[in-house]
Each structure stands twice: as structure tokens, then as C-alpha cells.
Image (cartoon, grey):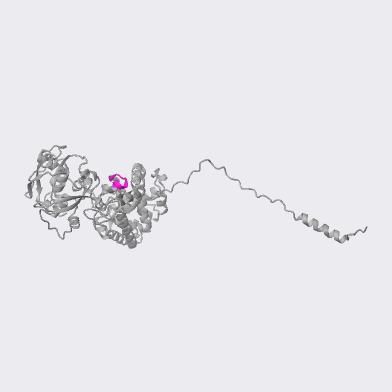
Amino acid sequence: MIRLRTPLWLLATLALLLTGCASMEPKPAELTPLPEVAEIPDEVEPPPERDIWDRVREGFAFSEADHEAIEPYRQWYARNPAYVDRVGRRAAKYLHYVLEHTALQELPTEIALLPIIESAYHPFAYSHGRASGIWQFIPATARRYEVTQNWWYDGRRDIHAATDAAGRYLADLHDQFDDWLLAVAAYNAGPGNVRRALAAARRAGEPETYWGARPWLPNETQGYVPKLLAIADVIRDPEDLGLELPSIPDEPRLVRVTVEGQMDLALAADLAGLEVDELYRLNPGFNRWATSPDGPHHLLLPAEQVGPFHRGLAALPDSSRTGWERHRIREGESLRSIARSYQTTTKRLRQINDLKGNTIRSGDYLMIPVALHEEAAYTLTESARTRAIQNRKREGRKVTIEVQAGDSLWSIADQHDVDVRELASWNAMAPGDPLRPGQQLVVWTRNPDAAALPQDFRAPHGHDTQRQLGYTVRQGDSLARISRRFNVSVEQLRQWNNLDGDEHLQPGQELTLYVDVTEQSGSS
């Protein structure tokens, strides 16, 4: 038997190979320890909502001022937390919309606080200087910035139009003065007054800044800027003054929607699921029962109501956006008297009836847009707001008078021995507002001679332009409709015809009216 001998060098080589293979066996991987995880609670609290006051603070750009003129106003706000809360809640409707505009116009957010100083964010504010709306535009400045003002609509009160115009005006003032405090002072006093105050400061060796020019500014403007800086301090750190601001989420509240034509505002409110009062407060520029036929054809609505409104509007025929009445022209009527009796304008009647001028013929018919509801449903029209102010109880005896040709607020105030500003405020007017013959004013007088007259007395023949008129009640007539048609009051109709307050009219019933012939053909 032959045995094969393995050389030693081969055995050594095999041993080395086997050792290497063993060393190539995989080793178990080393596990990286997991980081410790905090215990997860059952309910995770969402991050707090961003508050709109945070956004206001972040946009502040005025230099912080520490002037003795500011402190009295800071302390007044500290002593009146109810006022701060009330104004904050009123501003809540509009503040996000205003801030969006100031951001687009690259204005400091202090500008969005100006309506607090101007009007306390009251949409229907009206001053003795004829300034109107949250930004308190006077008529001339509004016209300069192309803000529409007419019988149907006053853009000075329109949140969108007035905010846009105010931003442009303030930006122009800043361009003039290159200083925000001077720009704000000029918004209040006018740029001419600010320039004169700066010139006086220069002559006196004072710095040409708001604080240097302040002694030469009107008294109101001397307090105007410190008030704004004080309310900015309140927003910046309310806790420092012991105040708490109402919580307002920083999210859109209002959306501007298109309606494309004249629309009854009570109908619009119904489509949006709103009370009529609320629709007027969001759209305070509209004076009457409907939007203006000439525009703007937009409404501001709460964001959550836009969908229902659009769906309702899409299902509504254009002809159903207002009511309609077919009017047979009577002898002696004019287009202007008809327009006034139906609470519309001669321009609108010409548009609808394709008239070239104001000439009409008795026996012809006119189609007239009318409100879908009784007048009482439109609670915040210009006339409704005026009546509410006139009916507010005050000291003295209330006497209702009828304006005669040539009257002014000054002459009436002098005749009744009352202050002209008080007289204007009792009637939702400013002392410079014009009067028209037949207009009714209330006077709260302490004059004992006034007690001899019944309250709301008007003589049937107060002056030689009044004429007695017989009127036959028609189907659908009411005292309110007849009073509008002839520009007299419901109370006058009751007095002249011995009607009880709850008496209903019957078709064919004869009424006696005393109408002012100049008023039946007056301007609309």
C-alpha cells in the first residue's frame, strides 16, 4: 500500500487559509441605542392661534416716543378699560381688512390704529366738521382722492374705498414731510397748517419735527398725535397699563364680493344669512334701501357667508334683485317729484325708461325700482339713522319744525335760542350742512313759548307755496308710501285726516294733503 505524504509547507498553507476563513465569519452588528422619547400625553394641545394684535405690534415703525404729552392719554386708557375693550371689539370686524390694505400700501401698522382716534372705529361716525366714516374724510378731501359721494352712496363711509383713499392720502403726506408724525398731524390739521407750524419752529430755533412744531399746531392736533402714540403703547404692552385686549384671531373676516348691478340690501342680507343691520354695518357707504345703480357693485360679507350668498345670487334672475312698480303719470307730476316719492333718482328713472330728458306726459307709464320690503325693514339707511337720532330723548321739550326757503341751521338756532352745534347734532347733521324746504328738524327747547304749540305741529298752510290736495287711496297704498310720494310725514297725514295710529287705509278712501309745490318739483 502506497501512502502519499503531504509536504509540511502545504499543511502550513492550508492551516493559514482555514484560520483566515474563520476570521471572515460575520459578527453580530452593534445596535445604536435609540434616543429617549418623552412620554406622549393623551391630548396634544394645538399651538395658540396668532392674534391680530401680534401682527399690529410686528408692523410698528414709528420711533418709540417718551414725551410728557403722551402720558395723560396713556393714563386715560388705563383708567377706562371698558372703552378699550369696546373699541377693540368694534374694530374686530374691520381690522384685518384694514391691515391687509396697509400692508399692500407698505404703511406702518400704526396707521391701522388711526380710526380708533378718528371715530373709535364707528362706521357711521359724523363730525360737526362734516367728516364721515371710520377715517373721517371731509367732502373736499374725499373728492380729491376720487371717493364717490351721491344720493345713493357715500364712499367716505365705505370700508374698502375709504381705507384705500386714506392710505393713499397718508402716503402722499409722508412723501411731503418725510416723517410719519408730521404726516399724521397733516392728516388731522391739513398740510398747510403743518408747514406753517414748521416755519414758526424754524424761526424760534426749534427742531423742524412734530414735537418742535407742536406749540404752533391747532389745539386738536397737539393732542391728536399723542393720542395715537398712546394707543400704540396700549397695543405694544397692555399689561404694563393693567389692560387686556380682546382676543381677535389674525384671519380674514371680510371678503369683497361682486353683485354686478343694483340690489335690494334686505334681499342681499337674506341671501347671505345676515341681519339687515349687520349688512349695513359692513357696508355703511350705502345710504338707501339698495346699492347704487352706478356702483360700486360690491359688498363686504363675512368670509363664511360668501358661499351661500353666491349660490343664492346665481339662482336669482336679474329682474328680481329689486321690486318693480308700474306708475301712471298724473297731471302735475314731474320726474323729480316721482323719483323722490319712490326713493330713487331722476337719473335712475331715465336709465330704466330710456328717457332722453326729464320731460314726461300725464297718462304715460314709468317702470320704477322699489324696495322689496316696507321702509321699516331698512333700519340703517341714512333717513332711518336720522330719525333714530331725532327721536332720542333729550333735555327740554321736543318741537318739530319744517324748513322754509331761506332757512339755515344758524337762523333756526338763533330763532329758538339754542346752540347751532346742538341743533345740528339733534338732527344728525353738521352746522355747515345745507337745508332744503320741507325738511323736518327737531329742536329741544326750554323756551316756554314753545309749550303753547302741540309737539310736532305744522300749520296746514305754513307758507304760500303749500297747496291743498285730494288723494284717493289705491290698492297697496300705506301711509308710509303716500308720505314718501308727496314728501310729507306720516304724522302730518294722520293730523290732517284725523287718523288713529293703527288705522288701516282702504282703497277708494279720500285723504287731504297739504303739499309744498316747490318740494314736489325740487331737485333730487
> Dividing the image into 4 quarters, which one contains the N terminus?
bottom right
The answer to which image quadrant residue 23 occupies is: bottom right
Label the magenta part by its dominant secondary structure. Answer: helix
> Dividing the image into 4 quarters, which one contains the C terminus?
bottom left
Looking at the picture, how far across and down is residue 85, in whole percent? Answer: 35, 43
Asked if one can make out residue 169 in the rendered structure from this viewpoint, the answer is: yes
Q: Is residue 197 magenta?
A: no
Looking at the picture, how far across and down is residue 312, in whole percent? Answer: 31, 49
Q: Is residue 273 magenta?
A: yes
Is residue 1 depicted above or below 303 in this figure?
below
Residue at horizontal 9 percent and vertical 45 percent from the top: 471
Q: Nearer the viewer, residue 472 or 250?
A: 472
Q: Which residues are magenta?
A: 269-276
Asked if one can make out residue 302 in the rendered structure from this viewpoint, the answer is: no
Q: Farthest residue to the right: give it.
A: 1
Q: Nearer the viewer, residue 514 or 6?
A: 6
Q: Is residue 141 left or right of residue 80?
A: left
Q: Nearer the viewer, residue 147 or 198?
A: 147
Looking at the picture, how far across and down is residue 104, in whole percent? Answer: 37, 58
Q: Nearer the viewer, residue 32 or 217?
A: 32
Looking at the picture, how far across and down is residue 274, in whole percent? Answer: 31, 45
